[in-house]
Image (cartoon, rainbow, N blue to C red):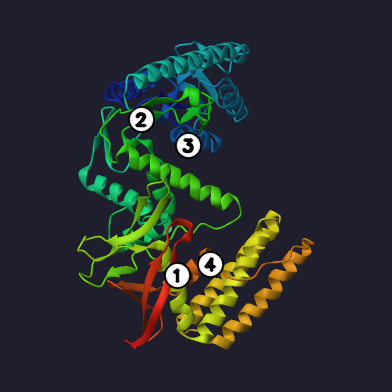
């Protein structure tokens, strides 16, 4: 018999892990098929297809198997040898589907250890029985593996990849990476004590050139995961995701808290528990504000913008408590140089006063815009999702127009035209909902904070005064003030003010 008349025979082998002992098994299977085919006159080896480190319950991810099917369609061989049904597939449906597809192409499959040849009349019947047994064995194996993993998790062994920023996972043990741990603490401090949101923190980390975890840049989602992750307080939560189908290996989020495994004080913490719990409360508070239809500005307008007139150090926010237990926020020099504290209410009041004194045109434009934003936000509380998205787009456009005006890109007249255009658009949107609510114009505290943020207000603190400088303004303004009262009676009294050339 010539080579041209010989039956071209392919072989398929697979091991389910990539460990060294399994690699030896794969090598042995290759050698076996070479020898087996050579021992049959009239057969000629076409190719040995091998998948390494892959499960048999699914065909989708097995590249060699898929290539074998493509070659079968091109007529590159007429017979496939495989050791046993479980090597070919552990999914009964896949086993029957692919052997039937091969049979239609004129390609038989011989399962050597199971003594099954799909070319025989009863081949498919015996194959169905053996495939069902293989699938059941796969199910039992999956259960045994899950049981073993759970026992090890309960004993404190860490499962999963080495993906938690700030930690190194080796041999099921978490150890702290000191350099990354310092960044984690910085993130928590910025969020909790400086009042910054994840957008601003991400920008500052990127500007500082701090390397992010496995990405090109810091993002809001990355920071939210760090702020929520219980690993940083020393706790360990496992089984956050579970495999719901041992055949497809599909995983879903495990929302059943009872099935999760939570170990308190499992490893060395990066953030103390008090700080971590305060951050969780603050994140919940900000989310609740957003869900009520109002905006929480995660970016505090004064963060990073207030400096000490004595030593030049940055002023940072601090929370204090009165004797009655109520809390209030104030700002103090990070260097503790002796320059006095500034109450947060006074800082905002002086900022509003400074804006009102720095020019009628600026004050009128910004105040009217602030009123329009307030109208839009009030409307958001009752509009449908489609209308709400429309109004938010209007707000984004208004903000861009404001930024353009402050940076000198557009004139006051152009800003006025843009504002009128979107005023009409937003009113039409609200009118479609047939709302009869009468809007209350004017700027709230939140909106004045928006304006101070947009104008990039910079503040210098002196012993008896505050100096403000706004983006695009060549003049600054110094405000002398005193404060009176406490709690609800607290107020800022402006004594005098002076505009100065910069």
Taking the view exactly as shown, the residue that stands out farthest to the front is: 485
The residue tagged 2 is 236
Give the spatial CA distance, label 3 vs label 4. 62 Å
User: Marks 3/2: CA distance?
Assistant: 42 Å
Residue bearing the label numbered 1: 349
Q: Position of residue 450 (x, y in %)?
A: 49, 68
Marker disc for residue 67 = 3
Marks 3/2 in contact by CB < 8 Å: the verdict is: no
Quick check: can you spot residue 30? yes
Mark 2 crowd level (few <14, some 14–19, many ≥20, 10 Å Cα): many
Q: Nearer the N terminus, badge 2 or badge 1? A: 2
Sooner in the amino-acid sequence: mark 1 or mark 4: 1
Badge 4: residue crowd in 10 Å (few <14, some 14–19, many ≥20): many
Q: Nearer the viewer, mark 1 or mark 4?
A: 1
Q: In the rendered view, does 28 fall on the left or right side of 137?
A: left
Q: Earlier in the sequence, mark 3 or mark 1?
A: 3
Determine crowd level at label 1: few under 14, some 14-19, many 20+ residues with C-alpha closer than 10 A: some
SS at mark 2 in the image: strand
Marks 1/4: CA–CA distance: 13 Å
Q: Is residue 322 above or below residue 56?
A: below
Give the residue displayed 55% in from the left and 27% down from the top. 107
Drawn side of residue 339 relative to residue 5, left or right: left
Tell me the quadrant of the picture where the N terminus can be found.
top left
Residue at 52% x, 86% y is: 360
Q: Which residue is mark 4?
A: 447
Quadrant of the drawing holding the C terminus? bottom left
């Amino acid at each position: 018999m010539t080579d041209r008349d010989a039956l071209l025979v392919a072989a398929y082998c697979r091991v389910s892990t990539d460990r060294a002992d399994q690699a030896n098994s794969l090598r042995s299977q290759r050698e076996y098929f070479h020898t087996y085919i050579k021992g049959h006159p009239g057969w000629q080896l076409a190719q040995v297809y091998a998948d390494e480190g892959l499960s048999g319950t699914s065909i989708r991810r097995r590249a060699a198997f898929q290539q074998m099917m493509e070659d079968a369609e091109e007529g590159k061989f007429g017979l496939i040898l495989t050791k046993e049904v479980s090597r070919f597939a552990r999914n009964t449906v896949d086993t029957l589907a692919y052997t039937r597809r091969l049979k239609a192409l004129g390609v038989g499959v011989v399962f050597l250890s199971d003594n099954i040849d799909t070319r025989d009349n009863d081949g498919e019947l015996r194959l169905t029985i053996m495939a069902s047994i293989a699938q059941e064995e796969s199910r039992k194996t999956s259960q045994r593996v899950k049981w073993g993993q759970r026992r090890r998790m309960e004993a404190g062994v860490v499962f999963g990849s080495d993906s938690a920023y700030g930690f190194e996972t080796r041999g099921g043990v978490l150890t702290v990476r000191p350099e990354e741990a310092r960044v984690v603490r910085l993130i928590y401090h910025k969020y909790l004590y400086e009042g910054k949101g994840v957008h601003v923190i991400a920008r500052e980390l990127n500007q500082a050139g701090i390397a992010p975890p496995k990405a090109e840049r810091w993002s809001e989602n990355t920071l939210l995961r760090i702020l929520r992750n219980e690993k940083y307080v020393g706790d360990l939560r496992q089984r956050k995701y579970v495999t719901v189908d041992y055949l497809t290996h599909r995983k879903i989020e495990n929302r059943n808290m009872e099935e999760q495994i939570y170990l308190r004080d499992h490893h060395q913490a990066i953030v103390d528990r008090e700080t971590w719990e305060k951050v969780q409360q603050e994140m919940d508070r900000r989310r609740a504000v957003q869900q009520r239809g109002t905006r929480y500005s995660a970016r505090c307008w004064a963060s990073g913008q207030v400096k000490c007139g004595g030593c030049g150090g940055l002023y940072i926010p601090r929370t204090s408590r009165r004797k009655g237990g109520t809390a209030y926020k104030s700002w103090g020099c990070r260097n503790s140089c002796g320059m006095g504290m500034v109450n947060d209410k006074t800082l905002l009041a002086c900022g509003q006063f400074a804006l009102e004194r720095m020019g009628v045109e600026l004050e009128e434009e910004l105040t009217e815009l602030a009123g329009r934003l307030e109208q839009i936000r009030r409307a958001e509380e009752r509009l449908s999702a489609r209308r709400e998205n429309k109004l938010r787009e209007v707000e984004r456009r208004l903000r861009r127009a404001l930024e353009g005006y402050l940076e000198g890109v557009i004139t006051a007249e152009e800003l006025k035209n843009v504002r009128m255009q979107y005023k009409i658009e937003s009113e039409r949107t609200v009118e479609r909902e047939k709302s009869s609510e009468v809007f209350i114009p004017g700027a709230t505290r939140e909106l004045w904070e928006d304006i101070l943020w947009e104008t990039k207000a910079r503040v210098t603190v002196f012993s008896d005064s505050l100096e403000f400088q706004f983006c695009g303004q060549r003049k600054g303004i110094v405000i002398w003030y005193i404060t009176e009262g406490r709690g609800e009676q607290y107020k800022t009294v402006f004594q005098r003010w002076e505009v100065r050339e910069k």
